[in-house]
């Protein structure tokens, strides 16, 4: 690889666990993510790697928090040139899907065995 080779610039504006105590500029809300994504694109980034947060900055696995981020795409705020990667990479246990999920019995041995 040389300095002349093309590269892909991707950025995770919030990371999985860092908070504003470590960096006051970390986005928490969808509007803050949209502003940061625009800055990433303006500086040559082509991909944004997003970890959902609650409005207070707490890392989240909640579907509604990911839907809030996805709504940015629907509004054209994360539209090309950015590729978007949604990630659930936070420490701690990921809550299982609800038992009413059609995929739940097929993907979780505990659901089949009752353990």
Image (spheres, helix red, strand yellow):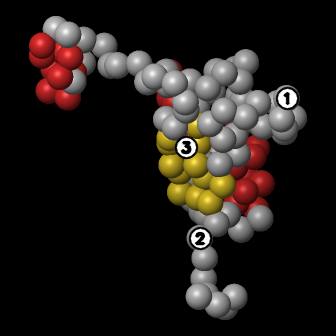
* Vertical relation: 46 (above or below) 18: below
Rendered view: 63 above or below 71: above
Q: Earlier in the sequence, mark 1 or mark 2?
A: 2
Q: CA distance from mark 3 to mark 2?
A: 20 Å
**Labels 3 and 2: the sequence-earlier one:** 2
Q: Nearer the viewer, mark 1 or mark 3?
A: 1
Q: Is residue 52 visible?
A: yes
Q: Quadrant of the C terminus?
A: top left
Mark 1 and mark 3 in contact? Answer it, CB < 8 Å.
no
Quadrant occupied by the N terminus: bottom right
- The quadrant where residue 101 appears: top left
> Callout 2: helix, strand or loop?
loop
| Residue behind mark 2 | 8
Q: Mark 1 or 3 closer to N-term?
A: 1
**Outermost top residue:** 114
Query: Is residue 72 visible in the rendered structure shown here?
Result: no
Q: Alpha-carbon neighbours of circle 1 within 10 Å: few (<14), some, or many (≥20)? A: few
Under circle 1, the secondary element is loop
Label 3: how many Cα within 10 Å (few below 14, some 14–19, many 20+): some
* Residue located beneath label 1 in the image: 21
- On the rendered structure, is 90 left or right of 54? left
Q: Are marks 1 and 2 in contact (CB under 8 Å)?
A: no
Please provide percent x and percent y for residue 92.
Answer: 51, 24
Tell me what residue is drawn at x 85 percent, y 29 percent: 21
Q: In the image, what residue occupies the spot 14% across and 26% down?
A: 106
| Viewer-side residue, 23 vs 103 | 23
> Which mark identifies residue 73?
3
Q: Nearer the viewer, mark 3 or mark 2?
A: 2
In the image, farthest residue toward the front: 115
- Looking at the rendered structure, the secondary structure element under dot 3 is helix
Q: Identify the residue at image location x=61%, y=26%.
A: 59
Q: Please tell me whether mark 1 or mark 2 is closer to you in this view.
A: 1
């Amino acid at each position: 690889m040389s300095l002349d080779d093309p590269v892909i610039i991707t950025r995770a504006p919030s990371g999985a666990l860092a908070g504003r105590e470590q960096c006051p500029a970390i986005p928490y809300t969808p509007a803050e993510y949209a502003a940061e994504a625009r800055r990433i694109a303006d500086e040559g980034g082509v991909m944004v790697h997003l970890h959902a947060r609650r409005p207070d900055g707490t890392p989240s696995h909640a579907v509604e928090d990911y839907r809030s981020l996805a709504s940015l795409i629907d509004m054209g705020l994360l539209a090309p040139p950015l590729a978007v990667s949604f990630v659930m990479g936070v420490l701690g246990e990921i809550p299982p899907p609800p038992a009413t999920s059609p995929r739940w019995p097929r993907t979780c041995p505990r659901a089949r065995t009752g353990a």
